[in-house]
Image (cartoon, rainbow, N blue to C red):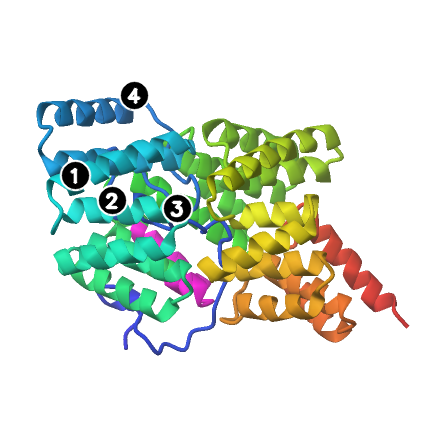
Amino acid sequence: MHRPEEEPAPAVRRGRHLRATAVTIALGVVLFTVGALGLSPTGSGTRSSAHSAAPSSGPARGMEALRERVKRLPKDPASWADLGMALVQQARTTADQATYTQAETALRRSLALQPAENLHAEIGMGALTAARHQFREALAWARKAVATSPATPAAYGVLADAYTQLGQYEEADEAVQKMSDLRPDSSSLARASYTYELRGDTPQAITLMERALRAAGTPGERTFALTHLSSLALDSGDPATALRQAQTGLVIAPHDAGLLEARAKARSATDDREQAVADYTAAIAAAPLPQYLLGLGELQQSLGHHDQAEAQYAVLRTQETLRRAAGTPADVDAILFEADHGDPREAVAMAEAAVRERPFLAVHDACAWALHRAGRDEEALAQADQALALGTRSALFLYHRGAIHQALGHNDDARQDLQSALAIDPTFHPLHAPAARAALRRIDDAP
């Protein structure tokens, strides 16, 4: 079979024997469901929790026009579906739970008006439920959308995202392949890039994401691709390129939270940590999501700014209280925060519940770390092995497993994992990278 750069559609057929790779940990939630599908009327794009442009006058006018349209056409299911999808996108950008509720109201209004074969509402509900970490429900909606219109690429995008988060990677590959066969555009190329990223072929992941960038038809698609090109460069040990890609994206979307986070990480990797603090602060102002709060808190802690770090952690604790009250599943960042800065036993309970609902690689890793922090290292090692079962090239995953091996007295295995983590990215985490170097010194000094 030809590689994707040699054919019009990127191929990710079942049975490929590719080594797995650096998973961008932030790729946790609706991987591409709104932005990379090109479904948003505003053209904004998302990956992870808030990799999209902050609202501007343009998107605001677009939302206003959609609201006016449903007022004029209250019995038009398509108008309600378009409004619902736009509200999902807005909620992803702002982290506003009330906006998700408005999105569900609009989408269910569309479905009430047209219960059967309502493609746009079905895709919208898939995006919404994925955004809420309800991935089994997202899968059900995606299957409905595929049944409604087997020739619509966007339906397979939602399907691929749900399968990925449920740990059904071969099924996700097949969905991406179908999407690519139907339309090899920026959305499908971005997803194909991710399948190679998961499988360890970082150069091919970069090649495909560069193609996604060239094929981008909206500012949102361009910023989406640049965010991930920055992440891939950083995972490849090239912070200068990571910084350049993030800065290029911020020219297009100066308030994009995901790009601000990407630049913060690149600046931290080049020891420009004060500017990294400024970027994280700006990202939080755009979208106060756990990954940004935790990133800033741990960066401040590494700088010895304990009061500033605790301010971020206090917000995270408040968010966790609200999450529990709402009964929504814990995300990876919440689990890792609880494990490192809260009660490890509570982190284990959160992680075990999350793994049951979302057996994705990053969730297995978070569960492993929570178990380790709670002193349950034999169980932790089993989870860490699952996180790395595809051979994933993630410095954080490898550090976690290395620390677990060290706790179990497996010094040779610990040395190998810790050295591999630092070889991938010597600045992979402001607290854990120095801890990895200290652990290696202890192993080497052991009699």
Q: Position of residue 333 (x, y in %)?
A: 56, 47
Q: Is residue 199 magenta?
A: yes
Q: Give the magenta-colored segment's residue range.
A: 195-212
Indicate the secondary structure of the residue bearing disc 1: helix
**Residue 302, above or below 368:** above
Q: CA distance from mark 2 to mark 1?
A: 10 Å
- Is residue 421 visible in this depiction of the protein? no
Does residue 160 appear to the left or right of 420 in the view shown?
left
Instruction: Identify the disc placed on residue 27.
Output: none
Instruction: Identify the disc placed on residue 47.
Output: 3
Residue located beneath label 2 in the image: 124
Instruction: First in sequence, mark 3 or 2: give its number.
Output: 3
Type of amino acid at the residue the image marks with label 3: Arg
- Observer-nearest of 390 and 350: 350
Residue located beneath label 4 in the image: 57
Q: Residue at x 63, y 51 (%)?
A: 347
